[in-house]
Image (cartoon, helix red, strand yellow):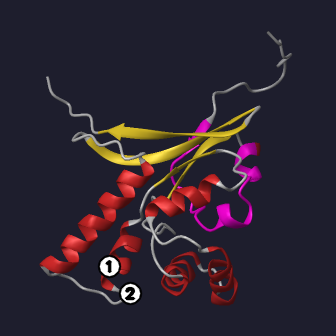
Amino acid sequence: MDVVDAAGCWVTPGFVDLHTHYDADVEVHPQLSESLRHGVTTALIGSCGLSLVVGEPEDLAEPFCRVEGIPRDTVLPLLEKIVDWTSPAEYVDHLRSLPLGPNIVGMLGHSTARSHVMGLGRSLEPCSRPRARSTRCVASSCESIAGRNRSSRSSTSGWRTATTSAGTAWSPTRTRTVSNRS
């Protein structure tokens, strides 16, 4: 066992960053070294409602330009270059191919799912057809991301990485809803 002299240092467990807006950043700088420098060992992407899980580059770029303030002439060419996935499972494969720094846990953003199914226009009361398509889109994402493991108690699923001497290993993670029953 190695002993590290931590005198005068802060020693903490790794931090989990639950709201990062790193969906596009992970494509440009997958090591996310700034987060690692701050002690973040796990970053959640997609929690803000935006994600890159499903959609065409043009449709994916629009919300990032509006919400994140990223210039269109920056984000659209990037997405046109990198988006080679057409399903949540392929997106997971794409992320697996990146030299990630921290663990990544991903969510299908609700805005991304809605715009993928209904288009970028707004709709206050979707009819049953878009609802069914939305349900399939979310189910497909959860199955892909969670390694196709299902649980009736599962509310959110994601993926994680662990860097080992042999490279990056992947395993599904599952977050369960916990009730406050007496």
Callout count: 2
Range of magenta residues:
15-36
Residue 103 at what x, y percent from top left? 61, 43
* Amino acid tagged 1: Val
Residue 40 at what x, y percent from top left? 65, 42
Q: Which mark is residue 71?
A: none
In this orientation, which residue lies closer to the viewer: 101 or 179? Answer: 101
Q: Horizontally, is 162 left or right of 179 in the view?
A: right
Residue at the spot x=36%, y=52% of the render?
143
Magenta region includes residue 30: yes
- Contact, mark 1 vs mark 2 (Cβ under 8 Å): no
Give the position of the C terminus as an image quadrant: top left
Q: Is residue 131 above or below residue 88?
A: below
Q: Which mark is residue 117?
A: 1
In this orientation, which residue lies closer to the viewer: 61 or 96? Answer: 96
Indicate the quadrant where residue 119 lies.
bottom left
In this orientation, which residue lies closer to the viewer: 66 or 46? Answer: 46
Residue at the spot x=36%, y=53% of the render?
142
